Amino acid sequence: MKTISTTQLVTLYHGSKSGIHGAIAPISREHCDFGKGFYMGTDRNQPLTLICNYPKAKIYTLSVDLTDLKILDVGLGLDWALLVAYNRGKMESVKHSTIYNYIKDLSKDCDMIVGYIANDRMFVVLDRFFNGEITDLALINSLSALKLGKQYVALTDKTCKKIKILNEQELSKDDRVKLKQNSEVNRSKGIAMADEICRKYRRDGRFFDEILEAGD
């Protein structure tokens, strides 16, 4: 974990199905990648793919002041994958084990988590990992090859108060149609690339259940 003490501003993006109403708050649904929070991304196109099916969708450009925040910056590796697994309820079978408690406490007392996005190109690969079809090495190398953007997740009201809206844009019907088409193409390309990598590493690394059992 790190604390940013000097003033540091970052520009991020947030997609909303129907717009932000009222104050920004850490109130996403429970089972998101890094838990309940307010999600923002470094790549403007990423949130657009998540909201392109909604007629009142809006994209926001935000300025976020990271000053004096306790931030967990998760690198691309097994901790990232297990943190996503924990927040999606995939580790309940080993609840209270050493590895469960380690992942649970990773973001303890944090104001923000910064980590790679498990976007629509990775959902299928992640599920294959959680279901025991591919190893951790196959998963991590797939993530590296896809060059995913990062997401910043505001976990506390303190953090949300440091977020300012710079721009708000409603998506037109034409924009949403094009985004949906591009999303489907990128998803297919991403899955094909990941499939190739998974075949390469199918005999290397550990499976999800092996990792959980070893962490008791």
Image (cartoon, rainbow, N blue to C red):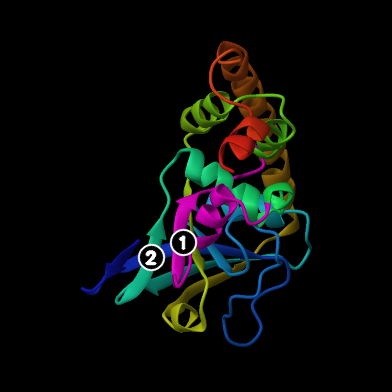
Residue at 44% of width from left, 40% of height from top?
Answer: 76
Q: Is residue 24 above or below residue 80?
A: below
Query: Residue under circle 2?
Result: 71
**Which range is magenta?**
95-121
Q: Is residue 196 left or right of residue 73?
A: right
Count every numbered label the image shows and give the total.
2
Q: What percent of the width, then of the height, locates residue 17?
A: 72, 66
| Residue 175 in view here | no
Q: In the picture, which quadrant includes the C terminus? A: top right
Q: Is residue 45 magenta?
A: no
Residue 129: x percent and y percent?
Answer: 67, 32
Q: Quadrant of the N terminus?
A: bottom left
**Closer to the camera in the image, 191 or 167:** 191
Secondary structure beneath label 1: strand
Residue 133 x, y percent position in the rendering: 72, 24
Q: Rate crowding at label 1 as few (under 14), some (14 to 19) or many (20 or more) other CA atoms within 10 Å.
A: many
170, above or below 128, in the image? below
**Few, some or many residues within 10 Å of mark 2 (<14, 14–19, 20+):** many
In-image side of 2 versus 204 (left or right): left
- Which three-letter amino acid code belongs to the residue tagged 1? Ile
Closer to the camera, 61 or 79?
79
Q: What residue is disc 1 on?
A: 113
User: SS of the residue at dot 2?
Assistant: strand
